[in-house]
Image: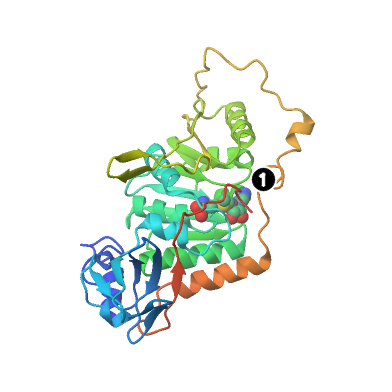
Amino acid sequence: MSQSNAKLTAGNGAEPHGAAARRGPFRAGERVQLTDERTRMNTITLTPGQAYHTHKGFLNHDAVIGQPEGSVVANNVGQLYQTLRPLLSDFVLSMPRGAAVVYPKDAGQIITMGDIYPGARVVEAGVGSGALSISLLRAVGDGGYLHSFERREEFADIARGNVETIFGGKHPAWKISLGDFQDEVVRQESPASIDRVVLDMLAPWECVDAVATVLAPGGVWINYVATVTQLSRTAEAIRADGRFTEPDAWESMVRGWHLEGLAVRPDHRMVAHTGFLLTARRLADGVTGLTPKRRPSKTEFSAEDLNAWTPANVGERDVSAKKLRRAAREATATAPAPVGAGSESTDTSGPQHVENAKDG
Ligand SMILES: C[S@@+](CC[C@H](N)C(=O)[O-])C[C@H]1O[C@@H](n2cnc3c(N)ncnc32)[C@H](O)[C@@H]1O
């Protein structure tokens, strides 16, 4: 990394980590989103001397480097492009991935309803592609602590690449460990030392004891699960443990709107389902939680029910080793590229598809 880039990305006390790199004129080495006149988007990494080619001519990267963000630039045949730095929500939907990512609308809910604050001590699992880790790091800030656990090394590599790309290098508050959350977190973190626990994995109910051990009294545990059956089993396990408040569950739906002249109406299509959120808070040791007045009449699961939670049964797709290796290569390649290294472009045009299949 050049000296000027290092200054821009390293937290220096006055500027939070990575903030300066998101302002000012475009610099060599950073990612820029190009939108053409038909609103098709592509992301390029600015590299002196290189060009972005389409069937409608080419745009020299040097025509963008040094321009203010939001400039409109022309290629060699007059094709116009609007130039902007990708927002976090753009980045997470186009970054290399192995597992399904937490959709931006859910990341926003997790940060707010999970009460993730600057300086908080947070543990998270699984890391997957690192989308949620990025939002959590932004929320805890340089003075916070995020310890992320991931059982699959390939996913950890992808996440590391993505986190370093968006922050322009290593984040001072981030630590990532390999292994099963429920085993590793109790080995690596002291009892009652963690403010917030965030789980996005197949079987959060396997983690109840570990979460109860590391979470401080009053601490928030927030889970993101893809199916109703996972939601129900996690809620029952939390209740049965007795060291937490009554769990709360919800989902959020975001409907975009079409804005054109008099045709102002909801979009015809939307991402209707991503996942459910479930929170509970750690009670003080030795306290019995208040039970709700009305309880469901049947909360037991049969042996047959308990065997039903397999990745295939909850609609998760297995990702091939080859696809994971390719995503890891792509993620590593986009992490802080030295100025002057090769350029790459990511097609982000068209509606973004977010897989509902969770976990791996
Ligand atoms: C859906 S992905 C997480 C996506 C991630 N939150 C994101 O936004 O990119 C689920 C991940 O959990 C990991 N995982 C599942 N169970 C785990 C466990 N007990 N401990 C650690 N990681 C686990 C899987 O390997 C997978 O990478």
Position in image of residue 102 (x %, y %): 49, 49
Residue 343 in view, yes or no: yes
Instruction: Check the image and name the residue furthest to the front.
Output: 262
Neighbor class of circle 1 (other Cα within 10 Å; few <14, some 14-19, many 20+) is some
Q: State the image quarter where residue 27 is shown.
A: bottom left
Identify the amino acid type marked 1.
Answer: Gly
Q: Where does the C terminus fall, quadrant-wise? A: bottom right
Instruction: Check the image and name the residue furthest to the bottom.
Output: 49
Residue 191 in view, yes or no: no
Q: Nearer the viewer, residue 152 or 64?
A: 64
Position in image of residue 246 (x %, y %): 51, 25
As drawn, 20 above or below 45: above
Q: Nearer the viewer, residue 64 or 193?
A: 64
As drawn, 260 above or below 39: above
Residue visible at 76% across and 38% down in the picture: 307
Q: Where does the N terminus fall, quadrant-wise? A: bottom left
As drawn, 328 above or below 90: below
Q: Is residue 175 left or right of residue 86?
A: right
Residue visible at 30% across and 69% down in the picture: 81
Residue visible at 33% across and 49% down in the picture: 119
Residue visible at 68% across and 18% down in the picture: 298
Identify the residue under disc 1. Answer: 315
Position in image of residue 51 (x %, y %): 37, 82
Instruction: Check the image and name the residue furthest to the top.
Output: 293
- Ligand 1 closer than 8 Å to the CB at disc 1? no
